[in-house]
Image (spheres, helix red, strand yellow):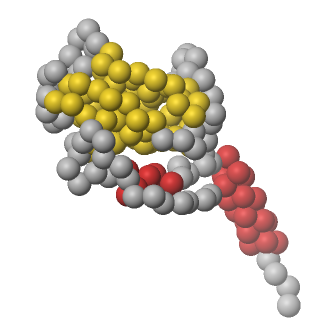
Amino acid sequence: MKCPQAIVVVVIVGVSLATLAGCTARPAPNTDWSERMIAVLRDPHGQGGAGGDLRIDSGARNARGTAYLADVPRGEYDVLAVCDGTGTIHLAVKTTTPPHRVLASSDFACGATLRLPVTVAATGVALEATDPSTSAQWQVMIVTPGWEPAPTTYSH
């Protein structure tokens, strides 16, 4: 049986382009890690949280991720933070209105959990994570003071 050469060439070119496109695509975020961290750190009486991927914007020196939690009421809280994909991340908890005063901040190592006490004097906080690497993941939850997540062991 004789195959038309045009069909063979189209199939080869199509497979080659699909392979190249797959090689140049950005890696998908590790949603399993994020979902596990949210489940572990969620305080049923807490104020929620945020997180995601840290990325370096054009012209920036550090990877950055910022989230605004507008509904966090005034009060005393603990901020629990975790990260993955780098060595250390810097977390700053700030006011949401200018001049964006820092309420609390700290560096923390990925693989460990940071507990950062914070006093929110006006409704809302901004969470800002930074890292000098090219990318990382972070997750932060605002919990009632002293609340402890259940002991859990996860591995990659």
Location of the C terminus (image quadrant): bottom right
51 in relation to 4, above or below: above
- At 60% from the left edge and 49% from the top edge, which residue is drawn? 27
Q: Is residue 40 visible?
A: yes
104 in relation to 31, above or below: above
Name of the residue lying farthest toward the right: 1
Q: Nearer the viewer, residue 36 or 135?
A: 36
Q: Is residue 66 visible?
A: no
Q: Nearer the viewer, residue 25 or 130?
A: 130
- At 26% from the left edge and 9% from the top edge, which residue is drawn? 99
Location of the N terminus (image quadrant): bottom right
Q: Is residue 116 left or right of residue 83?
A: left
Q: Is residue 12 left or right of residue 46?
A: right
Please give the count of numbered marks on the rendered protein.
0
| Residue 96 x/y as whole percent | 23, 21
| Residue 105 x/y as whole percent | 41, 21
Q: Quadrant of residue 49?
A: top left
Q: Nearer the viewer, residue 59 or 48?
A: 48
Name of the residue lying farthest toward the top: 99
1 in relation to 143, above or below: below
Q: Nearer the viewer, residue 75 or 2?
A: 75
- At 58% from the left edge and 17% from the top edge, which residue is drawn? 61
Q: Is residue 85 left or right of residue 80?
A: right
- At 60% from the left edge and 23% from the top edge, which residue is drawn? 132
144 in relation to 102, above or below: below
| Residue 70 x/y as whole percent | 19, 32
Name of the residue lying farthest toward the front: 146
